[in-house]
């Protein structure tokens, strides 16, 4: 069953849905989760971190097999990982919008069916 509701609302939803699907072909290098930085002190009394902000430690936090995982990210990877996480978030947002459009189209189709 593929609902095909009619009318301007249905047309608008379908247009937005297909625009999103064209915009986001399934990319291979997206990352889930969030990238964050924390600052730690190494404990050496002569290190700059003893009086300052500390050493930057980047990590990627994500869920895998129902468990939260936190992986350290080397400093030189941060820009690439940040780009991939942001792209993953944009893809997830677009996918949620497509799924919502599908649900709204189903509701419109149901309302347009003659009563039994």
Image (cartoon, grey):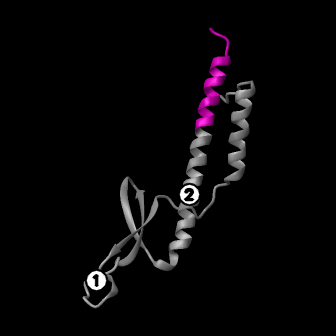
Local secondary structure at mark 2:
helix
Q: Residue at x 63, y 59 (%)?
A: 27
Asked whether 58 or 51 is in front, the reply is 51
Look at mark 1 in the image and give the residue it sits on: 50
Please report the bounds of the magenta region as a residue range: 100-116
Which of the two discs, 1 and 2, sits closer to the camera?
1
Residue 38 lies in quadrant: bottom left
Q: Residue at x 67, y 12 (%)?
A: 114
Image coordinates for residue 34, horizontal then vertical, percent = 46, 60
Q: Which mark is residue 75?
A: none
The quadrant in which the N terminus is found is top right
The quadrant in which the C terminus is found is top right
Look at mark 2 in the image and give the residue it sits on: 88
Query: Is 45 left, or right, of 10 in this rendering?
Result: left
Image coordinates for residue 87, horizontal then vertical, percent = 59, 59
Local secondary structure at mark 1:
helix
Disc 1: CA contacts within 10 A as few (<14), some (14-19) or many (>=20): some
Q: CA distance from mark 1 to mark 2?
A: 37 Å
Image coordinates for residue 24, horizontal then vertical, percent = 67, 53
Q: Is residue 104 magenta?
A: yes
Q: Is residue 18 above or below residue 13?
A: below
Asked whether 49 or 20 is in front, the reply is 49
Q: Residue at x 64, y 55 (%)?
A: 26
Query: Is 55 left, or right, of 17 in this rendering?
Result: left
Disc 2: CA contacts within 10 A as few (<14), some (14-19) or many (>=20): many
Q: Is mark 1 in CB contact (under 8 Å) with mark 2?
A: no
Q: Residue at x 69, y 34 (%)?
A: 13
Q: Earlier in the sequence, mark 1 or mark 2?
A: 1
Q: Is residue 5 above or below residue 41?
A: above
Numbered disc total? 2
């Amino acid at each position: 069953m593929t609902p095909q509701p009619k009318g301007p609302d249905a047309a608008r939803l379908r247009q937005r849905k297909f625009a999103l699907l064209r915009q986001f072909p399934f990319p291979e290098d997206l990352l889930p989760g969030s990238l964050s930085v924390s600052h730690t002190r190494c404990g050496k009394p002569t290190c700059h971190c003893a009086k300052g902000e500390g050493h930057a430690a980047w990590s990627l936090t994500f869920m895998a097999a129902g468990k939260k995982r936190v992986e350290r990210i080397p400093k030189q990877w941060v820009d690439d990982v940040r780009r991939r996480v942001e792209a993953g978030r944009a893809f997830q947002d677009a996918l949620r919008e497509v799924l919502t459009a599908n649900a709204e189209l189903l509701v419109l189709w149901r309302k347009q069916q003659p009563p039994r």
